[in-house]
Amino acid sequence: MAEPIAEALRLQLDAAAQGFDWDDPAGLWDKLAEEVAELRQAGDAAGRAEELGDLLFMVVNIARHLGVEPAAALTAANLKFCRRYAYIQRELERLPPLGDPDRLHRMEELWQQAKLDERY
């Protein structure tokens, strides 16, 4: 079976080739908001899984309309997360202990510092 992101893109391209596509790409953003709302309202694990799948499918659709290859964008996001989280990991020994509310606060400060450092 094809990788899920690539399969979603293939399905969307096939449908678009037959004319089943958004005639106004601005509607994609409303649909994305609708999918987020449905996920937030999902009542059980099965419903959350279904709605999350719909949301991911919609994100791939937006990527297609923006001319962005979704798997490459996700790979880049993963790498960015790894770089920034590595910044936090270097400070783990100096952070408040697990369970201390200040730990997350300090981690967020480090995350923001990592973001700033990437800009320079």
Image (tube, rainbow, N blue to C red):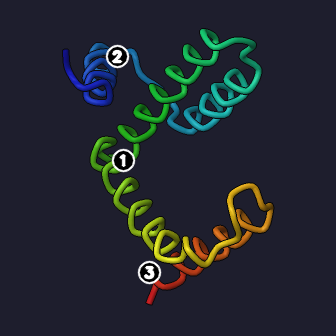
Query: For the view shown, which residue lies furthest in the bottom direction?
Result: 120
Position of residue 59 in the picture relative to residue 64 (left or right): right
Residue identifier under label 3: 118
- Where does the image place residue 21, in percent across and percent down from the top left? 41, 22
Q: Is residue 44 left or right of residue 5?
A: right
Callout 2: SS: loop
Q: Which residue is mark 2?
A: 19
Do labels 3 and 1 touch, CB within 8 Å? Answer: no
Judge whether 22 appears above or below 91 on screen: above
In the rendered image of this protein, does residue 71 appear above or below residue 120?
Answer: above
Give the SS element for disc 3: helix
The residue depicted at 38 percent of the width and 53 percent of the height is 78
Q: Earlier in the sequence, mark 1 or mark 2?
A: 2
Residue picked out by circle 1: 74
Q: SS at mark 1? A: helix
> Do labels 1 and 2 touch, CB within 8 Å?
no
